[in-house]
């Protein structure tokens, strides 16, 4: 589970080590979104996924339906409280990057994503608590041009995840 091979359409391959990025899910309501996030974590080589609070955990039919087996290949753990999980990561010196729209958030492509970053994704309806926002090293957002003010949580994580992977593969 440590090394990853990027397979390109032209048949070439390139070897990479799995990133140390950790993803924390804060009370996600939809098991299918959790499954989709497992699948993205597998695709981009995430180091660990921490499921918190009311977030569904494997084994779960909704997770299995969208993860399509990825939940068996991504290191994951469970924490009852998101704040405790975030504090633990911060105490290990890991930068906490939270995806949330605030008055001071920056656009996701303006952020730095060190290899030991922790990406925190919040509840689809309630967002991230003020306590988490205050302890975050950076708060990032995805710009929205339409009527709605956010993407589906799994789609939003995919955008961020592939920005991190793009930078890694390009050496940026």
Image (cartoon, rainbow, N blue to C red):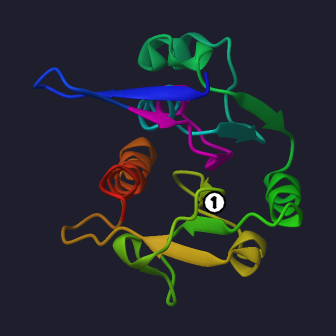
Residue name at image x 47 percent, y 28 percent: 4
User: x, y percentage for residue 52?
Assistant: 75, 42
The image shows residue 98, relative to residue 160, as above or below, that is below
User: x, y percentage for residue 131?
Assistant: 78, 74
Left or right: residue 159 versus residue 61 is left
Range covered by the magenta-colored residues: 15-34
- Mark 1 lies on a secondary structure that is loop
Quarter of image, res 167: bottom left
Quarter of image, res 170: bottom left
| Tag count | 1
| Nearer the observer, 53 or 76 | 76
| Nearer the observer, 24 or 43 | 43
Residue name at image x 74 percent, y 69 percent: 132
- Provide the residue designation for mark 1: 117
Mark 1 closeness class: few <14, some 14–19, many ≥20 residues within 10 Å? many
The image shows residue 86, relative to residue 49, as above or below, that is below
| Nearer the observer, 153 or 49 | 49
Q: Quadrant of the N terminus?
A: top right
Q: Which residue sits furthest left?
A: 10
Q: Quadrant of the C terminus?
A: bottom left
Left or right: residue 162 versus residue 21 is left
User: x, y percentage for residue 36?
Assistant: 44, 30
16 part of magenta stretch: yes
User: x, y percentage for residue 103?
Assistant: 49, 89
The image shows residue 163, relative to residue 54, as above or below, that is below
Left or right: residue 27 versus residue 108 is right
Residue name at image x 85 percent, y 49 percent: 81
Residue name at image x 68 percent, y 17 percent: 58
30 part of magenta stretch: yes
């Amino acid at each position: 589970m440590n090394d990853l091979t990027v397979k390109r359409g032209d048949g070439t391959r390139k070897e990479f080590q799995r990133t140390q990025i950790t993803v924390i899910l804060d009370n996600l309501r939809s098991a299918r979104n959790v499954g989709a996030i497992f699948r993205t974590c597998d695709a981009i080589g995430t180091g660990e996924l921490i499921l918190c609070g009311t977030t569904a955990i494997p084994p779960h039919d909704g997770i299995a339906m969208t993860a399509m087996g990825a939940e068996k290949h991504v290191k994951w753990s469970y924490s009852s409280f998101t704040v405790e999980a975030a504090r633990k990561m911060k105490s290990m010196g890991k930068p906490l990057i939270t995806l949330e729209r605030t008055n001071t958030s920056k656009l996701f492509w303006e952020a730095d994503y060190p290899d030991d970053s922790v990406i925190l994704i919040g509840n689809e309806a309630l967002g991230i608590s003020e306590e988490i926002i205050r302890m975050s090293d950076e708060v990032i957002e995805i710009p929205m041009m339409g009527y709605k003010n956010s993407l589906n949580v799994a789609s939003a994580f995919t955008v961020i995840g592939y920005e991190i992977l793009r930078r890694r593969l390009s050496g940026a």
